[in-house]
Image (cartoon, coloured by chain):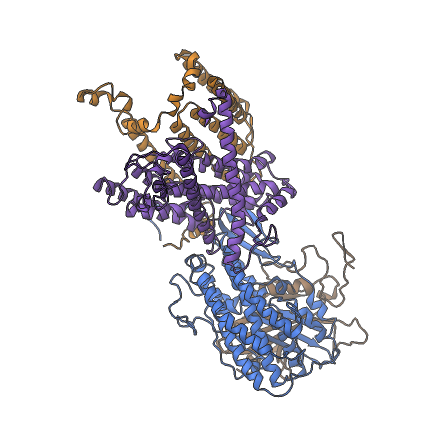
Amino acid sequence: MAVEGVDPEVAECDVRTDEILINMGPQHPSTHGVLRVVLRTDGEVVLEATPHIGYLHRCAEKIGENVSPRQWIPYTDRMDYLAGMNMNLGWSLCVEKLLKLEVPEKARHLRVIIVELNRIASHLVAAGTYGLDLGSFTPFMYAFREREKIYDLFELVCGARLTYSYITIGGAMADFPSGWLEKCEKFLNEFEPVVDELHALLTDNTIFIRRTAGIGVLPAEVAIDYGCTGPVLRGSGVAWDLRRDGDPWYTRMYEGYEFHVIAQTNGRYPVERPGHPVPKAAVLGDCWHRYYVRMLECVESMRLIRQGMEKYSRAKGGIGEPIKLMQKLPKGEVYLETEAPKGQMGFMIVSDGAAIPWRARARSSSFCNLSVLSELCRGCLIADVPAILGSLDIVLGEIDR
Amino acid sequence: MADFLAIWLPSWLALTLAALVHVTLILTLALTAAAAFTWAERKVAGRIQDRLGPTRVGGRFGWLQAVADGLKLVSKEDIIPRNADPLLFRTAPYVSFCASFCVYLALPFANGWVAQPLDIAVFFVLAVAGLEVLGVILGGYASGSKWSLFGAMREAAQVVSYEVPLALCAVIPVMVAGTMDLVAIGNMQAGWAWNWLIFHNPFLFITFFIYFTCAVASVNRAPFDLPEAESELVAGFLTEYSGFRWSVFFMAEYASMFAVSMLAAILFLGGWNGPLPITVWLGLAPNPATGYEPHALLAYFGNFLGMVNILIKATLGVLLMMWARWTLPRLRIDQVMTMCLKYCIPLAAVMFVGTMIYLYAFPVGLIFRSGGG
Amino acid sequence: MEFSEIAKLVAERFGERVVGVVAEAIDPWIEVLPEAVAEVARFLRDEPRLRFDFLHCITGVDYLQTDPKRKIEGQPRIELIYHLESMVHRHRLVLKTILPRWKDGVEGQLPEVPSVCSVWSTANWHEREVYDLMGVRFLGHPRLERILCPEDWEGHPLRKDYVMPLEYQGIRGR
Amino acid sequence: MGIVFHTVLFYLLAILACGFAVAVVLSNNIVRMAFYLVACLGAVAGLFFLAGADFVGALQLMIYVGGTLVLLIFGVMLTARGPLANIQTSRAQWAMVGLIGASLLAVLLYAATTAGKWTHSGQIVADRSHVSKPTATPIGLALLGVRADRLNAERTDAALGKGMAGYLLPFEIVSVHLVVVLIGAAYLARARRRATTPPMAATSGDSNNLDPGD
């Protein structure tokens, strides 16, 4: 739009101060770990944000070439350490697909319960720390209180609170202890009102909406182009959930379960909170939607857990035996992705027929989700960088492996 | 007080002594308030977050937590970064503290209980309170860290902007009262609660809330704590500070929180006068209707009750700020500025004009009976 | 679309440059010549019947015999595996290409393959990772730097003949 | 003895003011300079308070100290590139500044020595009744056009019109001047300039419109 009588080379611009190159991280409260983002800013405006990763690189893939698949399970725990169960499951399913090993019905439901519980725990951390990124401390405490309850449940089944190595190739390490299902039911009943509390503190808070709505808008095409998955992709309005759309070897686990894929399609979410419409300022693909998808998924996971508990109690038989520690693997290459809380977590195993894989590969969801950061941060304010980063919900353990 | 001491002492000694006593009293109050509020902050935060807060130090309620914190801070290593400007880095906390502390010089705690009675006390308080930002800017710049510099710049932008609506809001009760003398403003709100200036007219009622919002912003409390903004700027201007210097900044923050709350209490909430004229009933305060003048000792006791009253009001204001801090997310810098320039200033101006028209239309006021001092 | 149809389409379009089609594997794959990778990728994404709009992952596998007990089939080589998916048509594909371990057989010269960055932005970081850990040079990559290892790291750790350095920047390695 | 006390305070503040003023001149660092200037002006404000001119003292704090603060902010913003910016003064500048400074000093000294009652100022300061007298009201009235100090002297309407105009005209002139300055500042801040880096200008422009309030 040219204005008459104005020299085209003369542009209207505001007074600008010096450009500053500033390091956000690796020691920074809101980079969610040891991430370094180099910001080139003009005053408060970010001109360029470049993430630098690798501070937590622990050579997991190299280790995977030197240990047997079952021995590698503890290493998968330490990838997305906020959702260790989902990591265990991803690797186990991948190896099971290579072995063509099917787990018993009971183990299938057990896995669903455990994995969905961990999804809630992971989303709680995401929502809580997101509040923290935006300067609100209290939701963080509420979320962590509930997460501790989930960890108590996990401690009962496997003795560990963070790195479980519970789900394993061929089933799980142990069945639920007696009385566990009642405790889980009790937790679910306690947790339901907490979701509303979090909604009241964050989702419906005007300041929260102003800080997140319309910020870091990620269009669906860009999200797919960058390989974003999980809530990040669904927050952009793509109804894509591997639990429904994934590899048959994985979706079979959820056979007979009813759940919604949480994504806003045609202007509405499959689940809606009565009296609380999506705020007008929110644009599909912005931070608010990414956050909101996670919150709704918590409720969806609760539904899945309830169904799983019912199916588990009805299922007969055992939960299967784990394979031998040094079991010989058939020759072949298998790649399998599962829907982890952060996104699609892919594992690949290349076997030459020995007990130890020739190559083990982990495709990290946070890795791809983070790669879109510089795209999202162009032209935002410094205060938006933590907001965008928090809405991507990354875990550095998984990115750096 | 100086006149009282001058009966026995040479006047210069009397003046010095009186000044010392005043300063000691105010310092004690400011520091005690800071300590008490650190503890209260932790306790309030704990309760809001469904946990207990401090429980170990000093018995069940952790009364001595503030002392423990203080000891810890004092015994921490004092670090001055290599890139810092050592002189300014060292001076900055004290500049901040002095500014927020000097405010108390002109703040009355009860009828006539003020360190330095000034007939332009409101103006003085606003002028001095605005100087706290100097220390923050110096500290942020002298740290030689970019995060600190960002924090300082934010502080400058924010505080300098919010001074305007804050002063505008403070002027409105001044206009109603017809004086800038805080003692006089406090005294004219004696009697029942409807004599408080906040209930003088609807515009003043709204003004109080604008004032409080701007006050929260000008002392950098959440949701306006952008200069610190721990999730964005690490710790803003405080990033490079540690130990004692950090705690001086911290005390300055609490002192000014308390100061703006006290100013709010005097300007809007009746100052040292309770909602009921209890002191008049008990014969502890002069009764204008009967011309009763209490004995000096009784008046002293009445003033003491008044001081308790105003301290409670100011503390409630601080607690309100804490509540907001532990509930709300932080605003973004442009939103903070928008709020100031687009909403607070125009609203305050409208309230100013509204009050002016109201005063013109109802010179004696509708329910405000003892107006005009 | 079934794998056989996809393979047919690709084979028709690229003829000689499609080296192999393995349908019987658990994850069936198409193997193409390294220099054709970018072209094939663009075709896979843009062809309306295929529309592979989503790149999951790029994996490098180093085949080199270092342990006498574990024999490898064929020549020492590096395989690059691309996992693709079409969200529109809901089908998957594994694309493979085989590179020599060193360019022109000269030790130290990294093998080269065209980058698919311009086709899928996902490839940007994944190719950097493969370059970093496996030592494959992607031609046309906008910023081919190490991503997980420090910039001054030597060697490519996921290669089978990689030896952990004894010392890095004064830190003991072993 | 009150005289002694006030005199001691006066000298203390005066020395502080002068000392910091010298420090401003001698310092090379722009931020330190600004800090010394603030301290110097603060000491002057203290002198005003000592003289019982509370209103002027508070004004000094608000306007001069606050104004220097803004100067400081600009100093920091414009020199953010280096860690701590220094100002080097050339000989020619020294000479010019010396000339201007010397002539100003001469004017000041002349004014100071020719003013009456120079030697009696101590007594005026010590006068308590003078100190506690309200200073704001007459000034405020004078700004609105009523000279309080002449109210009692002249009573007739004609005289009111003549001698009572107060500071209304200067007040208005200053107000208009300030408005002009503000508009000028706003114009400068949004001036049209050659776009040296068009893409960045675009980015900056976009992001400044990020205000979600609209």
- Image coordinates of residue B101 in percent, x first then y, are 49, 36
Q: Output the letter for the chain in brown.
A: C
Q: Residue furthest bottom?
A: A316
Q: Residue at x 63, y 58 (%)?
A: C145
Closer-to-camera residue (D175/D74): D175
Give D34 or D15, whichever is nearer the viewer: D15
Q: Quadrant of the C terminus of chain B?
A: top left
Give me the chain that's purple: B
Identify by letter the chain in blue: A
Residue B316 located left or right of residue D176:
right
Question: Where residue B49 appears, x then y in whole percent?
Answer: 52, 59
Question: Residue B193 or D83: which is nearer the viewer?
Answer: B193
Q: Position of residue B246 (x, y in %)?
A: 58, 42
Q: Is residue A130 above or below residue A263?
A: above
Q: Is residue C44 visible?
A: no
Looking at the rendering, which quadrant does residue B215 occupy? Answer: top left
Q: Colour of chain D?
A: orange
Which quadrant holds the N terminus of chain B? Answer: top left
Query: Between residues D120 and A13, which one lies in front from this camera angle?
Result: D120
Can see residue A108? Answer: yes
Q: Position of residue A343 (x, y in %)?
A: 55, 69
- Asked whether, in this view, residue A221 is left or right of residue D172, the answer is right
Seen as rendered, the residue at the extreme right is C68
Query: Where A366 falls versus D35 (above or below)?
Result: below
Query: In the displayed structure, would residue A204 be above or below residue B234?
Result: below
Q: Is residue B344 left or right of residue C170?
A: left
Total marks drawn?
A: 0
